Image: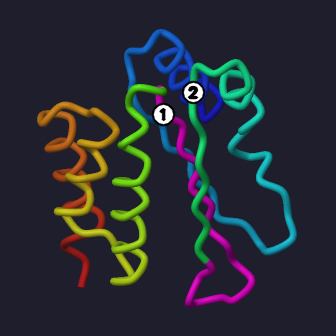
Amino acid sequence: MLRRILVKELEMMISEEKPLSMLCCSVMNGLTYEYIQEDKFDVYVENGLLVKDVLEFQSSDSPVVVTRYVMYALKDEIWRIPAMKLTLRAMNRVGRADESVDRIIGGLLDYSEEEIDEYIDAGRRNIYCKK
């Protein structure tokens, strides 16, 4: 399933249908991040179609866990990367995502309002309403 999602993300980026993709994985310090298969996207960074940036956070709950965000943007949409990094830093500082953060991230990833609403509604059932 994850492989299909990555293939679809990459296809949408190559066809310039999607301005920004973000891959994320949390791992123990010292391990590789092969799970998110950066190499599939990096070929397009090397040929100049995509721009790549990485942001990593060490978990406050466990000093050996690192979360890695890898962002790929179309060259003309590079402004989305610093905006996403600012949003992720704010989310990390607060310690969790909330509806506002999810809406900003969804917008930066170019999801429609309807898609973002569906994601938020699913989150309310699973995350936001848990006490």
- Image coordinates of residue 60 in percent, x first then y, are 56, 89
- The answer to which quarter of the image holds residue 127 is bottom left
Q: Which of 120/54 is in front?
A: 54
Disc sitting over residue 50 in the figure: 2
Dominant secondary structure (helix, strand or loop) of the stretch shown in magenta: strand
Looking at the picture, does residue 75 appear above or below residue 104? above
Residue at 74% over, 46% down: 35
| Magenta residue check for 69 | yes
What span is colored magenta in the figure?
58-74
- The answer to whether 41 appears left or right of 74 in the picture is right
Q: Dot 1, how many residues are within 10 Å of its Cα: few (below 14), some (14-19), or many (20+)?
A: many
Residues marked 2 and 1 touching at CB (< 8 Å): yes
In the rendered image, residue 124, in percent from the top left (x then y), is placed at 19, 62
Q: Which part of the image, by quadrant, shows the C terminus?
A: bottom left
Q: In the image, what residue type sits under mark 1?
A: Ala
Residue named by callout 1: 73
Q: Secondary structure at mark 2?
A: strand
Report the front residue among 51 and 130: 51
* Distance in Å between CA atoms under marks 2 and 1: 5 Å
The residue sitting at 37% across, 64% down in the picture is 86
Quadrant holding the N terminus: top right
Of the numbered discs in the image, which one, if any, rests on residue 19?
none
How many residues crowd around disc 2 within 10 Å: few (fewer than 14), some, or many (20 or more)?
Answer: many
